[in-house]
Image: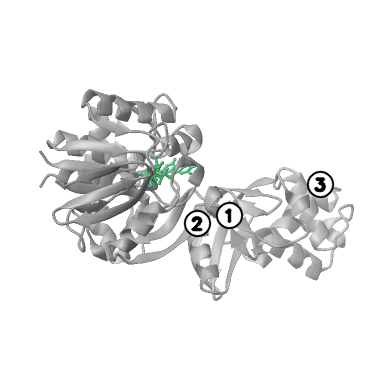
Amino acid sequence: MMKVFIIGGGASGLVAAITAKRSGADVTILERNDKLGRKLLLTGNGRCNYYNSYQDLSCYHSSSSELIPNFINRNNLDMVLSFFDKLGLYPTIKDGYYYPVTNQANSVLAVLLNEIEHLNINVVYNCYVTNIKKNKDTFVIYTEDNKYIADKVIIATGSKSYSKTGSDGFGYSVAKDFKHTIIPVLPSLTFLKGNENYYKDWNGIRSNASVSLFENDQKIKEEVGEIQLTSEGISGICVYNLSGIIAKALNNNSNVHVRINFVPFYEACSIKDFVDLLDNRNKQLKGRNVSQLFDGLLNYKLINLLLKLCKIDNKIHWEDLSNEQKCNLADRIINFKFIPTGVGDYDKAQVCSGGVALSEINLNTMESLLMPGLFFTGEVIDLDGDCGGYNLTIAWISGLMAGGHVND
Ligand SMILES: Cc1cc2nc3c(=O)[nH]c(=O)nc-3n(C[C@H](O)[C@H](O)[C@H](O)COP(=O)(O)OP(=O)(O)OC[C@H]3O[C@@H](n4cnc5c(N)ncnc54)[C@H](O)[C@@H]3O)c2cc1C
């Protein structure tokens, strides 16, 4: 019987183990923690957003983007849904976002662990793999105090984000040992840091916003959602979805900046249009000072900060502002410039971009094209997704692929 060892019992490793065992292999998971799936429990704020019905290739990112359709396609996505359906996971779907109906990430982990137990899959806990070597037809897996002989090995060790959950980047070094190319690994799905004194004044503000990313003054991406202004910079899902590109741009010393529109519901509004709109609002809401004029439209703390940045006294009335002052304020509201100086570090990034080059992996099986018998699943590969269940989708599909072909 084919001896398959899976290094890492996280999202992709668990799915790979189940699928490999079902295909008839003798499967062992080596997990450094005393529990399986620690990161999975943190996902979706403890609710686990495990899939999304909106699927578009633009939700996924890789330096080999031309290869993504080989992996993200209807057939593979349907396999994911059918896999969880058969494990008894009932979803609740909100705007396309799939969560377990219990709203507990633990339910996703539980259905996986129940199947691991049902299939009698061997799990070795507290087992940190330190090295993997090829010896003729087998692999020798070295741990801190043991060694194992395997016919096939699946590297499911994750990236190096949230290393306290166990993923410390080990998979990249194994891949390198087997001559794989590692696309530079950077934090993604995290907040943006800036460098302004006034962040202490906006800390805690939340607002609707559209957030646009400019690279060399060219707009390259726009996200809409709730933005959080923090003592370090800006955060929120709409910001997270830009952070991967910004991390890469900063790493390449490219010139990037972000523009925030705090009133995204006024569509494609120019500064002149917005000033006209405020002129009308001022006619309607007679006698208000300029701060009161924005009550019901903008967060109170935010408008007062923007007024301060424009050096406008908040007691003054709109009609007493010069046209230049009106345009200046309008510009800050619909076109606020934020210059990122960094992104949240690995321990504050939900995922990492980069990893094992896709061109060196058979994306139908997840087997290395350089080392037969060695497979890669999950975040260790050079493929990551936006917020919204896309990263777990990558973990599920790759786990299903590797587990399903490891016994070929
Ligand atoms: C806070 C947070 C929230 C998230 N929310 C979502 C969400 O809602 N939806 C979504 O799609 N994605 C989400 N993600 C991302 C998602 O969790 C990951 O993309 C996914 O878990 C990656 O799966 P994986 O199998 O590659 O790695 P992991 O799940 O990280 O598993 C890797 C496993 O390998 C083990 N391991 C590592 N090295 C070794 C070694 N040398 N020896 C033995 N064992 C080892 C680790 O202990 C770990 O158990 C979130 C991530 C975070 C941090």
Q: Residue at 49% x, 55% y: name it.
A: 188
Question: What's under tag 3, amino acid-wise?
Answer: Gln
Q: Quadrant of ligand 1?
A: top left
Does residue 67 lie above or below 56 as drawn? below
Disc nearer the start of the sequence (2/3): 2
Label located before the other in sequence (3 or 1) = 3
Gap in Å between the C-alphas at discs 1 and 2? 7 Å
Mark 2: few, some, or many residues within 10 Å (few <14, many ≥20)?
many
**Do callouts 1 and 2 mark residues in contact (Cβ within 8 Å)?**
yes
Residue position for label 2: 187
Identify residue type, mark 2. Answer: Pro
Looking at this rendering, what residue extends furthest in the front direction? 145
> Which tag is nearer the camera, tag 2 or tag 3?
2
Residue 123 in view here: yes
Q: Does the residue labelled 2 lie within 8 Å of ligand 1?
A: no
> SS for tag 2?
strand
Q: Using the image, tell me which numbered label, if any, was put on residue 292.
A: 3
Label 1: element kind: loop
Confirm or deny contact between disc 2 and disc 3 (CB under 8 A): no
Left or right: 34 in relation to 295: left
Residue displayed at 29% across by 53% down? 132
Q: Distance between the residues labelled 3 and 1?
A: 35 Å
User: Which quarter of the rendering shows the N terminus?
Assistant: top left
Question: Which picture quadrant has residue 103?
Answer: top left
